Amino acid sequence: MNTTSLAGVRVRFCPSPTGTPHVGLIRTALFNWAFARHHGGELVFRIEDTDASRDSEESYTAIIDALNWLGIDWDEGPEVGGDHGPYRQSQRGEIYADVARRLLEAGELYESFSTTEEVDDRRKAAGQDTKLGYDNFDRDTTDEQKAEFRAQGREPVLRLRMPDEDITFTDYIRGEVTFKVGTVPDPVLVRANGAPLYTLTNPVDDALMRITHILRGEDLLPSTPRQIALFHALKRIGVAESIPDYAHLPLVRGEGNRKLSKRDPESNLFTYRERGFLPEGMLNYLALLGWAIADDRDIFSMSEMVQAFDISKVSSNPARFDLKKAEAINATHLRALAQDDFVERTLPYLAAAGLVAEKPTDEQRALFVATAPLIQERLVVLSDAVGMVRFLFESEEDFAPEPDSAAKALGEDAKPVLDAAIAALEPLADWTTPAIEEALKGALIDGLGLKPRKAFAPVRVAVTGRTVSPPLYESMELLGRETTLTRMRQARNT
């Protein structure tokens, strides 16, 4: 199905504020955003917060924070406003009550007094599986029966009368989908205490906010026939103008092909921000969870995604969250940053680690600016810079080679290497990268006849504390003569 000619597109992103934003949720937001922007349409952001026992203001704030960090903007909703508010369901109770009343008066809803036990007993008596759920028994309850139930102290729920025919719709991703008549029981829309359920509030909001396309997770597909039936009812009472089109996005799975739950640590979006994923890298990877810009291309910008995005090209197969691939994509975006941009994005991670002040001094900033070109190509995420440059910013009292690195490189065999290196470096008049390189190569490779790995590993660990560091000669120049030689002597005498 080609969607390139759509006009007047209005989509929505409507999370419940429970827990921390997870990658599957944000993938849904991204696809809705890209679909709206591709068609010059509008993205409505609303909060489905009617479950007071689970919803929290902290989670609501986290969702806003996540979208702002990633640059996913919206045209209507919290923090923005619009013509169809309020955009939090907890503030729309009177709207739902009014629509429910109109649906009941029109005969679209009916009062249902059956208890779960009564439904199960009827199923068992008919030789049916109780898992089939409600049996539509109360459709034809008489006024006398209703009065008798009320006299017993029973209060009804309100159920939607499902149509006596198949429900068929065309999904942009899955093609034609049919739910046979009788397979979907009449759903509860309003509890006995008058509280509206998701089965009512979600479609009512979509209708009143004039949503044209619903892009949501595959796990919600079983509820689609109920929504379509309600949209038709809302249309008959003048609340809805039309029935939205649907696209059910593939599930995001984790390791072992299991569904990635919001409780899984790897699904927590902020874990990746804390590690130093770039918004560009995170969005690029999330876009690949079910969609591709081309068969032979993984790296692209969000403007390129918007230009190319076609919802019908989204795969119906589950997508697997592959951390290694996410890291590789992020590293590519990181390497593409302009140096000034890279410096500004990385300094907060150094500050969080205590290597520089929260507002870096001129000296700290200048040292990191000089170091940045040496490490940018070597990082996967921004926080990797902390370990890479720690040796430059730590005080001599705090500096010590990492135990594992020291064990590998600073044994007895390292002492003659360090002796030769110190002897070659001490008389250098010009403490520059070329002079340091020439002196060390002359002393260790030509003089001692060592292979580069054997020659430079002890020096690297003595000076930087790690077996992996920025380029050695440049690091020694930045560190300075006295500090470099002091660390080498200490390593020699350890």
Image (cartoon, rainbow, N blue to C red):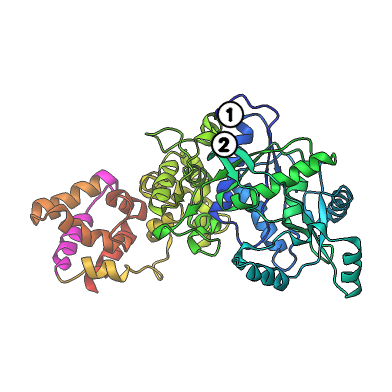
Q: Which residues are magenta?
A: 413-434
Return the x and y of residue 296 as percentages of the image width and height.
Answer: 37, 34
| 346 vs 339: above or below | below
The rendered magenta stretch, by its main secondary structure, is classed as helix
Disc 1, SS: loop
Q: What residue occupies the far top of the structure in this picture? A: 5
Q: Amino acid at mark 1?
A: Thr
Residue of label 1: 3
Q: Residues within 10 Å of mark 1 (few under 14, many from 20)?
A: some
Return the x and y of residue 309 as percentages of the image width and height.
Answer: 54, 33
Disc 2, SS: loop
Q: Is residue 421 magenta?
A: yes
Residue 236 visible in this rendered orientation of the protein: yes
Disc 1, disc 2: CB below 8 Å? yes
| 213 vs 422: above or below | above
- Quarter of the picture containing the C terminus is bottom left
Q: Which mark is residue 172?
A: 2
- Quarter of the picture containing the N terminus is top right
Identity of the residue drawn at 10% across and 56% down: 450
Residue 82 visible in this rendered orientation of the protein: no
Q: Residues within 10 Å of mark 2 (few under 14, many from 20)?
A: many
The quadrant holding residue 137 is bottom right
Return the x and y of residue 430 as percentages of the image width and height.
Answer: 27, 47
Return the x and y of residue 230 as percentages of the image width and height.
Answer: 75, 47
Q: Amino acid at mark 2?
A: Tyr
The quadrant holding residue 119 is bottom right
